[in-house]
Amino acid sequence: MSKQYAYYPGCSAMGSSIEYDISTRALCKSLGVELVDIPDWNCCGSTPAHASDHLLSASLVARNLAIAESMDVEGIITPCPSCLKNLKTTSLRMQRKDFHEKVESIVERPVRADLPIRSVLQTVVEHCSPQSIAEHVSKPLKSLKVVPYYGCIMNRPPDVMTFDDPENPTSLDRLMGALGAEVLPFPHKVDCCGASLGLVRRELVTRLSGRILDAAASLGADAIVTACPMCQLNLDLRQNQINRANGTQHSMPIFYYTQLAGLALGQSESCLRMDKLCVSPAKALQQVGAPAQEERAR
């Protein structure tokens, strides 16, 4: 029997990572994970809000929590690690009575803050298990060498995120392995890519993200697989900037895990919006027998 979850897509899913949102919805549907959008949800404030004011940041999140609590669901899930951290941090802070009362006075409605909150990745892995997912694979990712890249906040801080090992997570590794890909051990799997500092300190992002690309290429990887919109953006959209800054010539496709999972489960390349990737995935897709789309949307 499928389970219903309140789905918080986050702002990136409405723009720069719309392919993540589309492929997430497609993957969840195929695995019997039913997503119900939180109606009239608002931005969680991302990094700027909690860096400025914890109370106002929590109030942004609490409004979404309150709406989700009015739904008959198992919990809240989101594909974005940054949104996840804000949702879970607020839920924990709301356990303090004085903080709880201040937030409720701002949002002007009761907030229980007791619904389970998970990432889509955690839900997929725990709801279905990689072994069960492997039974549904119709197009295994054979011949595709990938390095799973979790980024620095998917599993951190561990007492807040409470999923997988904070220093050596393996959930994405196990999922990719179940889909038939050759998973390479990647020592940079939880390194920071520079996150949103690409707007104000581009040299920092080109250095940090360049280090991740260098490491993946040195291992002979065909692609990097990620679960974070910001990590994907820095490694994919900024790859030409990174090459120019570092004197490299990387042409490494950066997939969302939901895209590769959908492909292995028989979904089409166009359905998974592979055309939204900036670095052409054509060569990698040809390796797994998927027809390459030469025309890309951007």
Image (cartoon, rainbow, N blue to C red):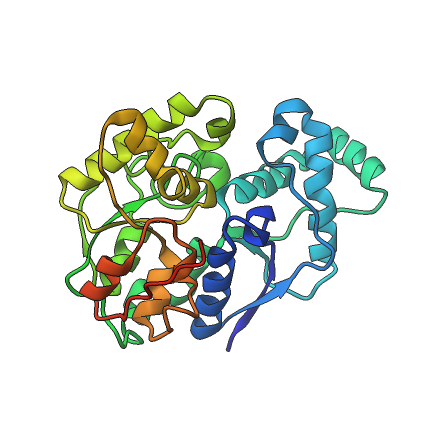
**Quick check: 84 left or right of 204?**
right
Q: How many marks?
A: 0
Residue 130 position, x and y percent, is: 31, 63
Residue 27 position, x and y percent, is: 43, 67
Residue 168 position, x and y percent, is: 28, 39
Picture residue at 71% right of the left edge, 40% below the top: 60
**Quick check: 20 left or right of 15?**
left
Q: Is residue 208 above or below residue 240?
A: above
Q: Is residue 125 visible?
A: no
Q: Tell which of 136 and 12 is nearer to you.
A: 12
Q: Is residue 110 visible?
A: yes
Picture residue at 72% right of the left edge, 29% below the top: 55
Picture residue at 69% right of the left edge, 56% below the top: 68
Picture residue at 31% right of the left edge, 54% below the top: 280
**Quick check: 216 left or right of 40?**
left
Q: Quadrant of residue 232?
A: top left
Q: Is residue 175 above or below residue 163?
A: below
Residue 77 position, x and y percent, is: 55, 55
Q: Tell which of 239 and 18 is nearer to you.
A: 239
Q: Tell which of 163 and 210 is nearer to you.
A: 210
**Quick check: 101 left or right of 7?**
right
- The residue at the far front in this view is 295
Q: Quadrant of residue 52?
A: top right
